[in-house]
Amino acid sequence: MKIALLTDGIYPYAIGGMQKHSFQLAKELAGNKCTVYLFHCNESSFDASKLEFFTEEERKYIKSFVIPFPHKTYFPLHYLYESHLYSKFIYEALTPHLPEIDFVFAQGFCAWELLKHKKEVKPPPILVHFHGLEMFQNIPSIKAKLTNIFLKPAVKKNIQLADYTISFGGKITTMLQSIVPKEKIWEIPGSIDKLWLSENTMPVKDAVRFVFVGRYERRKGLPELNKAINTLSSSAKFSFEFIGDIPDSHKINSSSVKYHSKVTSEDKVKEILSNNDVLVCPSFAEGMPIVIMEAMAQSLAIIATDVGSVSTLVNEQNGWLLKSPDPSAISNAMLDAINNKESLSSKKENSRKKIAKGFLTEQVTKNLLEKIEASKKILSSN
């Protein structure tokens, strides 16, 4: 099978959850001996044309097309303009190869221009994946609300023109069902590589260890998390680590809190996660955060808000699913973890088991390929 993967970057040539998803998807498709026409950009100091983070065997099945992402001078909605322009560059490079391709998998806006010319060029089936649909979620930021006014119509148009779209499950499915018929929605969870699975669950020590991973942006709930940490009693034995770029003005001055700044090495992230007990993810909007899956694979319990598809990962068996990122709800969940170490140990182990059972990339890609094959049969019968 020949599949075109359109994406605005693969890890580590570009950093982000979607980029990690694209990287793992390309690896697994190649591992299944699918020919991958990979259209991507390079935002790093590496040479993306060499694909040095793939094995020699995987590279045999990947045709790499490095498309420069058109970064322009900042102005309101610059990302929307740049994404549209990037999709035009991809369309120009992709068009000569369309007769060879069986299926198009497009991340975000990458198929925008192709979808506009769908009737004209008659491409193979196109799947568009917008991951978290954060623009349809409630973020307490005036800037985000104004941006979403323009993002929503563009996202809707792309999804409606596509033949299929993916939902990670949970509330994402409900959002998509308001845009397209349910038969166009494929429920396929996010996934991570099996190398993330820890061999053993670290025992809970006297002081429970919490960690947050992510950059500072309003939707991540950092102000609420800081309030929760500050309201915990001084007698509560715990530590808290932050991985990500956090401005000094939003840092807590306490011997119990440590800041690592941005960490790009996966091995270093694994090391930090493996030395903690609970990941805290108090977001206002999410898709299916890879960081939650990575933490679960490293046997961490999870405190997270019920947004996006988080409920498919987190429940009372492996953590605390909060209705909202309210500071008191966050601090109460943290206190429960601190005061109930036996229950916390069980939650930690359940996290690892859940990832191993249904969220490894090998399993999820097999599900995707089965759906693609079924779609081809439907198309040929029509």
Image (tube, rainbow, N blue to C red):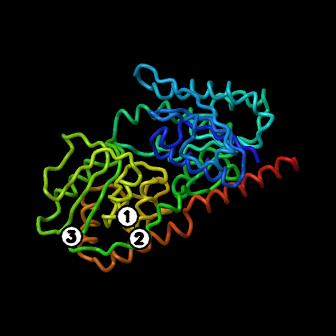
- Mark closer to the chain start, 3 or 1: 3
Q: Label 1 near label 3: C-beta < 8 Å? A: no
**Circle 2 residue:** 318
**Residue 292 appears at what percent x and percent y?**
42, 58
**Circle 3 residue:** 207
Give amino acid for label 3: Ala
* Numbered label attached to residue 126: none
Residue at the image point whose x is 67% and y is 59% from the top = 366
195 shown above or below 63: below
Along the line of sight, the residue nearer the viewer: 223 or 244: 244
* Cα–Cα span, label 2 and label 3: 19 Å
Give amino acid for label 2: Asn
Q: Label 2 near label 1: C-beta < 8 Å? A: yes
Give amino acid for label 1: Ile
Q: Which of marks 2 and 3 is in front?
A: 3
As helix, strand or loop, the secondary structure at mark 1 comes to strand
Along the line of sight, the residue nearer the viewer: 361 or 332: 361
281 with respect to 136 (left or right): left
Name the residue furthest right: 381
- Mark closer to the chain start, 1 or 2: 1
Along the line of sight, the residue nearer the viewer: 88 or 243: 243
181 shown above or below 99: below
Residue at the image point whose x is 35% and y is 64% from the top = 274
